[in-house]
């Protein structure tokens, strides 16, 4: 049982001590870690990450480092310098991401695949499955979409584009189906299988980059043939932002309805929360597993599609996926595996990425700080007990109160 | 030693588990702690054993305030605890377990097994708790494992012994042995705290009883003078009807017909063998037995969770031996699983969702693949009302309900269906007295509406209260069934492995040829030439 157990009524009092078994499996604990923390903890995790980030900025800033040298004689110098560095950096971060039309469209563009890749992790999590294979599914989806995208150039856009996107979904879905069926049929653990499939996808992509079928004559800097205009995701507002963001949002709504309203989603949820009880109720763990992983693969495949049909429409290159599958894990974690949360987390990480670039350009802070910030956020989200303790959200600790017993 | 708890209060988020509990355990007494599940008994004892620390209050030992930072401090102060789930290392011997942490060693650190064995043997002799020191714990029956636990506490010189639900895992005979040992320990001057929610046991062994309800001590009673009704009322907070009011059964057609059924475990070994049993419309057949004698596999096979290895299973004449779980559930089998938390409920789903867990994808709760949550909620509101589930609402997470109310959710779901056969395993395990009363009443009602009811329970009292016919499961074999009434002691002996002939004499049935018991006499006559479908069973 989690520590944020629901309070019970006065007339039906439950003794949590009698229900803490101490035997929760690793799987249960991981699920708790991802779905457990509440909104307050998530927000506070954010605050903490930025506080730690501020300390890093302060101590890495040249001016404040100099002021640190005589901090005992004139401490205000150091604090002023540090404050300037911090506000400068975070100011650039925020204005870069949200302060201009371009910032906003760029943020949305960056958020698009993050939302989809996040959903690809969040959905299986609801079924109690860890999809570490987002990367491979993104690559497979992107390749399928691009292959359809650079072939059939004569087709009209209304036919060609949906066809390419659908191919991307199918490509990812196949990559998701494989660990699903292997788990159900042979018991192979999805974490191992999906990790291995990542490598297979990466190598497969590298191999296609040596074949004329995919790259034509471009042997020097290998790149797939360019996507036909009729399969290119149309852009909007005169910016680089394409309609992929709507695909992501529509996918999110569909998945949300699927999980919250559909019988299939209910089965997946029940299997994820208690596979034994679900089986006892006549549900099929295997069916839920395959559905969840296949759909997840499809979502990651869409993420790959928006990359190959949108951002990198010059042609597929090695590493076009850019670690999206792994970013998806962080996004899902921050979104607590719920669809709205995942969308928010995706938008946020998109904005952080764009803001980080501005921060680097304007305040001279390395983009890696954004990576550190993201990691810190996840760290604090994953350790809700730490955040609760830091902010005294919990009941007083055992030892602190123990003194009163004998007092 | 005398133990005194003063104003012990323990809060968990949203719950006060112990509310200013005052309790005195006198020197040399067995103090019964009676209370429903969730009343706060275990929390209180965990505080006493140093596992939790109280938010308020004082613990006094012989008048001196003490403070425990962990079980180590409590052990040093002379407090021992026998947990409900044993804290033993199965692959170690009794002596190794008992001396664990304070091992005998030769110079140089090599273990001195002989010294350990001797010490443990002396200890077991001294306290009249016979136990071989050099046997592996995993090879011991549960009752003797418990004895090892007690020895472990005594070895650490416990002067006050806490026994947390010690009888839950024992056969009636083992429980009697335990009571004898407890009495001996008391007579030697030790104090014991005995935790149980069974009134009968408190009356059998306790010198004084404290009753805990909702975290508060609501009374202290003398087991010699207090009646069961009074104790139950203190425990539950309202008058409780302890006797199941059950009219004569009127059995109809055969619903479940098991013919020489074998059930294999995962390794292909038959753990249940040769089960032949019929359950008829309008009767309750109860299977007694100590847990772990194949009941789990038996129930799972009948309800389609576990394949039948050999033999035949008919439900209303249809061969269902190879049918899947869903088909059996939709085909008219209601199933109250033995472990509601693991098998029966999804704790982190709402009551409403749990109430439709087994027909989640069928009309009317799902239409065109979409859940009809408004309907599911209405259904839940009705069930909460009809089954007296105490909850703030249908959206409450099942995991936050008390054990009794969780079980009522399972019962509501399974009983509400149009069942031909109802299979209930441990239907009132870990359920408070008030809910037991209620669930038993519903089971009898279900029977009277013409359902065939199969109860599997390790609670002998429950079996006796509900059964129209009773069978005993021992080592994967079914003994019986016998028509009620059957003497409780006789069932107890069969639970421990006695054959019907040993218990009832050559006829192998209770009261053979007795005037009022025609069925039994008839069965005895027919024993040589059993026929199928006549509503009787080959014993």
Image (tube, coloured by chain):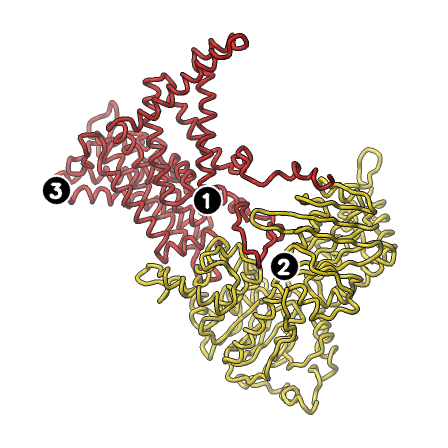
Chain colours: A red, B yellow
Picture coordinates of residue B47, whole percent (x, y)? 70, 47
- Is B292 displayed left or right of A259 in the figure? right
Image spot of residue A192 (x, y percent): 45, 41
The residue under label 3 is A156
**What residue did someone put label 2 on?**
B37
Between A302 and B389, the one nearer to me in the picture:
B389
Left or right side of A113 for B69? right
Query: Relative to residue B67, is residue A344 drawn left or right?
Result: left
In front: label 2 or label 3 = 2
For this rendering, which residue is in front, B4 or B274? Answer: B4
- Within 10 Å of disc 2 (Cα), the crowding (few <14, some 14-19, many 20+) is many
Tell me how far mark 1 sits from mark 3, CA to CA. 44 Å
Labels 1, 3: front one: 1
> Regarding mark 2 in the picture, which secondary structure is present there?
loop
- Return the residue at label 1: A35
Per the model, the C-alpha gap separating discs 2 and 3 is 69 Å
Q: Are marks 1 and 3 in contact (CB under 8 Å)?
A: no
Label 1 vs 3, first from the N-terminus: 1
Query: How dense is the environment of label 3, judged by Cα within 10 Å: few (below 14), some, or many (20 and up)?
Result: few
Q: Residue at x 71, y 72 (%)?
A: B492
* Disc marking residue A127: none
Quarter of the rendering occupied by the C terminus of chain A: top right
Residue B247 higher or lower than A366, as above or below: below
- In percent of width and height, residue B455 lies at 58, 72
Whether residue B384 is situated above or below residue A219 in the rendered picture: below
What secondary structure is found at the residue carrying circle 1?
helix
Chain letter for mark 3, please: A
């Amino acid at each position: 049982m989690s520590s944020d157990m629901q309070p019970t009524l006065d007339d039906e009092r439950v003794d949590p001590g009698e229900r803490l078994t101490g035997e929760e499996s690793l799987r249960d604990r991981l699920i708790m870690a991802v779905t457990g923390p509440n909104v307050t903890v998530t927000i506070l995790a954010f605050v903490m990450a930025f506080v730690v980030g501020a300390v890093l900025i302060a101590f890495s800033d040249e001016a404040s480092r100099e002021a640190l040298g005589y901090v005992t004689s004139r401490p205000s110098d150091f604090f002023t310098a540090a404050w300037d560095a911090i506000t400068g950096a975070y100011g650039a971060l925020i204005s870069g991401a949200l302060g201009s039309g371009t910032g906003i469209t760029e943020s949305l563009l960056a958020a698009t695949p993050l939302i989809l890749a996040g959903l690809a992790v969040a959905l299986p999590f609801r079924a109690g499955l860890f999809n570490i294979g987002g990367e491979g599914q993104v690559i497979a989806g992107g390749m399928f979409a691009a292959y359809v995208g650079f072939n059939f150039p004569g087709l009209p856009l209304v036919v060609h584009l949906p066809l390419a996107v659908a191919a991307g979904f199918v490509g990812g879905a196949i990559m998701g189906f494989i660990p699903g069926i292997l788990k159900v049929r042979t018991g192979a653990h999805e974490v191992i299988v999906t990790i291995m499939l990542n490598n297979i996808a990466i190598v497969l992509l590298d191999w296609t980059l040596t074949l004329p079928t995919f790259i034509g004559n471009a042997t020097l800097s290998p790149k797939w043939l360019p996507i036909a205009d009729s399969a290119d995701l149309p852009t909007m507002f005169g910016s680089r932002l394409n309609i992929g963001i709507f695909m992501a949002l529509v996918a999110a709504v569909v998945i949300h309805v699927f999980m919250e309203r559909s019988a299939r989603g209910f089965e997946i949820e029940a299997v994820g929360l208690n596979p034994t009880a679900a089986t006892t109720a006549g549900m099929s763990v295997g069916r839920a597993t395959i559905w969840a992983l296949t759909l997840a693969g499809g979502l990651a495949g869409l993420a790959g599609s928006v990359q190959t049909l949108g951002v990198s429409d010059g042609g597929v290159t090695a590493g076009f996926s850019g670690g999206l599958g792994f970013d998806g894990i962080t996004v899902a974690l921050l979104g607590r595996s719920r669809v709205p949360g995942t969308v928010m987390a995706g938008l946020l990480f998109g904005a952080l990425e764009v803001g980080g670039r501005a921060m680097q350009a304007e305040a001279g802070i390395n983009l890696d700080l954004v990576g550190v910030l993201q990691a810190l956020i996840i760290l604090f989200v994953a350790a809700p007990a730490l955040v609760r303790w830091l902010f005294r959200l919990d009941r007083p600790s055992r030892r602190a109160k123990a003194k009163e017993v004998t007092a | 030693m005398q133990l005194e708890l003063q104003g012990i209060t323990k809060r968990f988020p949203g719950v006060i588990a112990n509310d200013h509990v005052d309790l005195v355990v006198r020197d040399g007494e067995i103090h019964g702690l009676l209370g429903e599940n969730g009343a706060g008994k275990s929390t209180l004892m965990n505080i006493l054993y140093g596992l939790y620390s109280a938010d308020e209050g004082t613990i006094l030992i012989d008048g001196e305030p003490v403070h425990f930072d962990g079980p180590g401090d409590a052990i040093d102060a002379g407090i021992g605890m026998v947990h409900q789930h044993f804290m033993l290392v199965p692959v170690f011997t009794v002596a190794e377990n008992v001396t664990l942490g304070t091992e005998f060693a030769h110079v140089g650190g090599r273990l001195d097994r002989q010294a350990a064995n001797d010490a443990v043997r002396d200890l077991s002799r001294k306290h009249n708790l016979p136990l071989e020191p050099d046997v592996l714990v995993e090879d011991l029956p549960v009752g003797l494992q418990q004895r090892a636990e007690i020895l472990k506490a005594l070895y650490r010189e416990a002067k006050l012994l806490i026994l947390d639900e010690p009888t839950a895992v024992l056969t009636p005979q083992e429980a009697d042995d335990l009571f004898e040992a407890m009495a001996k320990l008391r007579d030697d001057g030790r104090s014991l705290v005995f935790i149980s929610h069974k009134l009968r046991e408190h009356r059998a062994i306790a010198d004084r009883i404290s009753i805990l309800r909702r975290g508060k001590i609501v009374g202290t009673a003398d087991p010699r003078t207090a009646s069961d009704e009074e104790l139950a009322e203190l425990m539950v907070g309202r008058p409780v009807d302890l006797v199941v009011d059950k009219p004569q059964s009127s059995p109809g057609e055969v619903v479940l017909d098991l013919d020489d059924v074998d059930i294999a475990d995962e390794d292909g070994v038959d753990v249940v063998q040769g089960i032949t049993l019929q359950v008829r419309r309008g009767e309750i057949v109860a299977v007694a037995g100590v847990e772990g004698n194949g009941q789990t596999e038996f129930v799972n096979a009948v309800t389609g969770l576990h394949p039948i290895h050999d033999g035949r299973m008919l439900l209303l004449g249809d061969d269902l031996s190879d049918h899947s779980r869903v088909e059996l559930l939709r085909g008219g089998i209601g199933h109250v699983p033995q472990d509601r938390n693991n098998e029966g409920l999804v704790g982190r789903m709402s009551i409403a969702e749990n109430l439709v867990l087994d027909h989640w994808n069928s009309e009317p709760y799902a239409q065109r693949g979409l859940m009809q949550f408004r309907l599911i909620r209405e259904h839940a509101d009705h069930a909460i009302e009809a089954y007296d589930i105490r909850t703030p609402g249908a959206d409450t997470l099942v995991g936050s309900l008390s054990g009794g109310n969780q079980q009522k959710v399972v019962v509501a779901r399974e009983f509400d269906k149009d069942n031909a056969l109802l299979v209930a395993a441990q239907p009132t395990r870990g359920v408070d007295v008030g809910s037991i009363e209620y669930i038993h009443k519903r089971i009898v009602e279900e029977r009277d509406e013409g359902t065939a009811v199969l109860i599997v329970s390790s609670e002998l009292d429950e079996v006796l209260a509900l059964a129209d016919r009773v069978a005993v499961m021992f080592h994967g074999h079914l003994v019986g069934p016998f028509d009620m009434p059957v003497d409780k002691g006789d069932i107890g002996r069969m639970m421990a492995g006695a054959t019907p002939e040993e218990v009832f004499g050559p006829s192998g049935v209770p009261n053979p040829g007795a005037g009022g018991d025609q069925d039994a006499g008839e069965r005895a006559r027919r024993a040589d030439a059993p026929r199928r479908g006549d509503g009787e069973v080959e014993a």
